[in-house]
């Protein structure tokens, strides 16, 4: 959402107005973010700080998509066990769904962004995966922009584990189709009636392409026109800001 709905601590008035137009027209929508460190309520509060009203049911993250993916895999007779490398958003999504923590022999190791990452956390993840645990990565973003510059993202943490186990994670978040399919189930609308809006070609637009959805790239964030011009597959639509999009 950073770069599309807001820009760091700065609001994007055109985006705020766009969300208001969606609400006035009663068009269903979801905020689809790759952030796994925040709970849904924390995302709602973040949006409120930019003048955007949202409910927790309108927030969907890789944490929630991982939860839903694992629920589909779960045996009703026994709850799945997980070892988590991540923060409160990931922990809350999985533990509130009934998964149990297991630091030694979990069914799944789930790795996301962890600002308090330690060698010991990575070691436990590696040993569990090498012992047969399934390996899930929340999202592949190698870097995140903040006021200091480009800092390590979840993809960098996951790559650390991948290097040690010589095995790729199953990725859930954008640009993977898994999170989009799970989000569409929650939104409960036909695929042909959905457009994926974002500022980042590599995550947002590729998620649309991978999921056979129309996509709308808005040039208020990460991707530039020159970068997109070099891509073999273009977004369905491109605009400078969200005031240009008519509902």
Image (tube, rainbow, N blue to C red):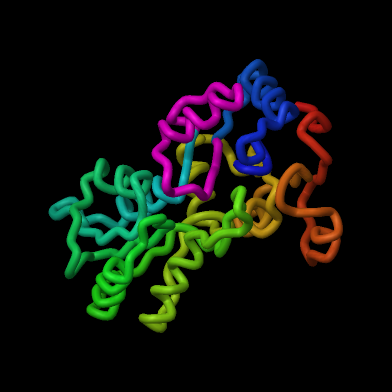
Q: Residue at x 71, y 23 (%)?
A: 17
Q: Residue at x 84, y 54 (%)?
A: 225
Among the 4 quarters of the image, the one containing residue 24? top right
Give coordinates of residue 166: x percent, y percent.
Answer: 41, 83
Give coordinates of residue 43: x percent, y percent.
Answer: 48, 35
Among the 4 quarters of the image, the one containing residue 2? top right
Q: Is residue 99 visible?
A: yes
Query: Quick check: 86 above or below 16?
Result: below
What residue occupies the far front of the structure in this picture?
148
Q: Quadrant of the C terminus?
A: top right
Closer to the camera in the image, 239 or 75: 239
Horizontal side, residue 121 vs residue 184: left or right: left
Horizontal side, residue 6 vs residue 140: left or right: right
What residue occupies the far bottom of the structure in this picture?
166
- Magenta residues span 31-58
Does the magenta portion include 24? no
Does the magenta portion include 44? yes
Closer to the camera in the image, 22 or 155: 155
Give coordinates of residue 31: x percent, y percent.
Answer: 55, 37
- Count how many numbered circles sit on residues in the image: 0
Query: Quick check: 42 above or below 165?
Result: above
Q: Quadrant of the N terminus?
A: top right
Closer to the camera in the image, 66 or 27: 66
Q: Residue at x 33, y 60 (%)?
A: 85
Horizontal side, residue 71 vs residue 3: left or right: left
What residue occupies the far left of the structure in this picture?
77
Q: Is residue 216 visible?
A: no
Give coordinates of residue 182: x percent, y percent.
Answer: 46, 47
Among the 4 quarters of the image, the one containing residue 170? bottom left
Horizontal side, residue 245 vs residue 130: left or right: right
């Amino acid at each position: 959402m950073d770069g599309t709905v807001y820009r760091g601590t700065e609001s994007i008035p055109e985006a705020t107005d766009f969300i208001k137009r969606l609400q006035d027209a009663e068009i269903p929508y979801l905020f689809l973010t790759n952030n796994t460190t925040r709970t849904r309520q924390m995302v709602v509060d973040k949006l409120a700080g930019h003048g955007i009203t949202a409910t927790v049911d309108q927030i969907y993250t890789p944490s929630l998509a991982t939860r839903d993916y694992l629920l589909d895999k779960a045996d009703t007779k026994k709850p799945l066990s997980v070892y988590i490398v991540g923060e409160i958003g990931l922990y809350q999504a999985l533990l509130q769904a009934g998964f149990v923590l297991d630091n030694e022999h979990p069914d799944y190791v789930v790795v996301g962004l962890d600002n308090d990452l330690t060698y010991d956390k990575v070691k436990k993840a590696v040993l569990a995966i090498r012992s047969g645990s399934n390996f899930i990565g929340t999202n592949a973003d190698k870097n995140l922009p903040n006021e200091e510059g480009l800092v390590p993202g979840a993809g960098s943490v996951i790559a650390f584990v991948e290097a040690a186990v010589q095995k790729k994670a199953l990725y859930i978040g954008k640009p993977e189709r898994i999170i989009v399919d799970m989000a569409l189930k929650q939104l409960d609308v036909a695929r042909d009636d959905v457009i994926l809006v974002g500022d980042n070609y590599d995550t947002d637009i590729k998620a649309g392409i991978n999921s056979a959805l129309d996509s709308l790239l808005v040039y208020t964030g990460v991707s530039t026109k020159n970068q997109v011009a070099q891509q073999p597959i273009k977004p369905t639509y491109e605009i400078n800001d969200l005031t240009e999009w008519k509902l």
